[in-house]
Image (spheres, rainbow, N blue to C red):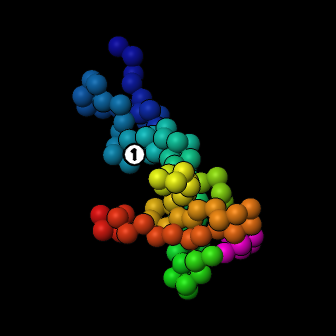
């Protein structure tokens, strides 16, 4: 009979024949390492979304409704990351990062928005 070893640390396993790990710590460590890359991707995207939301919220709360696009760029806003799009009846597209968003006014200016329906959820 072959000697079974812990999939994480390599220690010889004792006990049940279908045992894969010597302890809960090794099981957790093995699974955390297995999922590290996908978890890091999700964590990084979530951090970008939170940063974008914080920037929009700060500008909105100090009563800045009409802003220049450069104001977002200077603040570190990443235009590639948002949670959802809402198209109005007139065809205007609003990009939201959770409950805060913006729509294009022209080539240079944006109108900041807050979606009250999301706040009430």
Write the residue at 65% across / 65% down.
Answer: 105
Q: Quadrant of the N terminus?
A: top left
**Residue located farthest toward the top when viewing the structure as drawn:** 1
The part of the chain drawn in magenta is 67-76
On screen, residue 3 above or below 32: above
The image quarter in which residue 59 lies: bottom right
Judge left or right: residue 80 versus residue 5.
Answer: right
Q: Is residue 18 magenta?
A: no
Write the residue at 33% across / 46% down.
Answer: 24
The location of residue 47, given as percent across then percent down, is: 55, 60
On screen, residue 87 above or below 100: above
30 or 34, nearer to the observer: 34
The location of residue 22, given as percent across then percent down, is: 35, 39
Q: Which residue is mark 1?
A: 28
On screen, residue 66 above or below 39: below
The image quarter in which residue 44 lies: bottom right
Write the residue at 52% across / 42% down.
Answer: 38
**Residue located farthest toward the bottom when viewing the structure as drawn:** 62
**Can residue 60 be seen by looking at this rendering?**
yes
Determine crowd level at label 1: few under 14, some 14-19, many 20+ residues with C-alpha closer than 10 A: few
Q: Quadrant of the C terminus?
A: bottom left
Write the residue at 41% across / 33% down.
Answer: 6
At mark 1, the secondary structure is helix
Judge left or right: residue 117 versus residue 54.
Answer: left
Determine the main secondary structure of the stretch shown in magenta: helix
Judge left or right: residue 98 versus residue 94.
Answer: left
4 or 78, nearer to the observer: 78
Q: Is residue 75 magenta?
A: yes
């Amino acid at each position: 009979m072959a000697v079974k070893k812990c999939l994480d640390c390599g220690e010889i396993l004792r006990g049940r024949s279908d045992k894969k790990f010597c302890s809960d710590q090794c099981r957790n460590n093995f699974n955390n390492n297995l999922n590290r890359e996908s978890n890091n991707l999700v964590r990084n995207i979530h951090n970008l979304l939170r940063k974008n939301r914080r920037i929009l919220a700060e500008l909105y709360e100090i009563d800045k409704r009409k802003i220049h696009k450069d104001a977002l760029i200077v603040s570190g806003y990443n235009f590639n990351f948002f949670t959802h799009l809402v198209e109005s009846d007139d065809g205007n597209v609003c990009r939201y990062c959770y409950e805060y968003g913006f729509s294009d006014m022209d080539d240079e200016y944006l109108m900041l928005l807050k979606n009250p329906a999301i706040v009430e959820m």
